[in-house]
Image (cartoon, grey):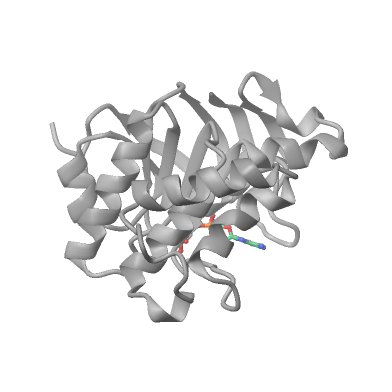
Amino acid sequence: MIRFENVTSVYAQQQRAALEDVNVDIDKGEFVFLVGASGSGKSTFLRLVLRENRPTQGRVYVAGKEINRLASWKIPSLRRDIGTVFQDFRLLPNKTVAENVAFTLQVIGKPRGTINRAVPETLELVGLEGKGQRMPDQLSGGEQQRVAIARAFVNRPMILIADEPTGNLDPNTSVGIMKLLDRINRTGTTVVMATHDAGIVDQMRKRVIELDQGRVTRDQARGGYGYQH
Ligand SMILES: Nc1ncnc2c1ncn2[C@@H]1O[C@H](COP(=O)(O)OP(=O)(O)OP(=O)(O)O)[C@@H](O)[C@H]1O
């Protein structure tokens, strides 16, 4: 589903590569944690999957397509297939919860009937039934992240990318968010999550890819945050 072949990424004006000769193959339906110190290249990896950045060398494939050879008019369609969730939620503050979730479908031109069906269904999936008419600032942090997940998932993307989704949440709330991401993963969506949250990685026992100064130093099935035998 996601394949990096000898990917090196160097930002303009930087000496050191943000990613260096990275080779990774993530299958459909996998759940992968990306770990590593601050600055190790996790966000750069995720940006390359979204084609927000382009590699200096090497190839990035998403769903079998080399995405850096896509015509620019095909990029919106690539990004539609990839839901994104961030540490800071990024909800539209002047729209209700339901409107935030509906927005994803409106921008891709889905008919109103589909939207009216999909939004409550997805809010129920994330445990926010009955809260569709609230404004984001009337929700807890954990609930706001659930809205962000609903918005990312409402059009059933192939891939869900989460960059530090529990970074602003307390441990209990984070566990709830992880259960939700796990449930989404079980529907067949590939999940790639960058995190510093050792407790969660140790608990979930999923595949762990560790980066150190832009290089993959570990790629372990059912790993922990640190290396364990
Ligand atoms: N837009 C940019 N321009 C120049 N250098 C950048 C840019 N974004 C990231 N970098 C550099 O690339 C390297 C990797 O950064 P990246 O943000 O991918 O790391 P990260 O692992 O996501 O870090 P964090 O855990 O702090 O989010 C770092 O050395 C960083 O300073």
| Camera-nearest residue between 144 and 15 | 144
Residue farthest to the left? 229
Q: On the image, which quarter does residue 146 sit in?
A: bottom left
Residue 126 location in percent, x, y?
35, 51
Q: On the image, which quarter does residue 16 sit in?
A: bottom right
Q: Is residue 49 left or right of residue 226?
A: right
| Camera-nearest residue between 181 and 203 | 181
In this view, 138 is above or below 183: below
Q: Residue placed at 48% from the left, 50% from the top?
A: 42
Residue 199 location in percent, x, y?
18, 54
The quarter in which the C terminus is drawn is: top left
Residue farthest to the top? 64
Residue 170 location in percent, x, y?
23, 70
Q: Residue placed at 70% from the left, 51% from the top?
A: 106
Instruction: Judge whether residue 214 can be spotted in this image.
Output: no
Residue 205 location in percent, x, y?
20, 36
Residue farthest to the front? 113
| Camera-nearest residue between 46 and 210 | 46
Counting labels gives 0
In this view, 134 is above or below 80: below
Figure quadrant, ligand 1: bottom right
Instruction: Judge whether residue 228 can be spotted in this image.
Output: yes
Q: Residue placed at 67% from the left, 42% from the top?
A: 79
In this view, 96 is above or below 7: below
In this view, 140 is above or below 41: below
| Camera-nearest residue between 91 and 78 | 91
Q: On the image, which quarter does residue 73 sit in?
A: top right
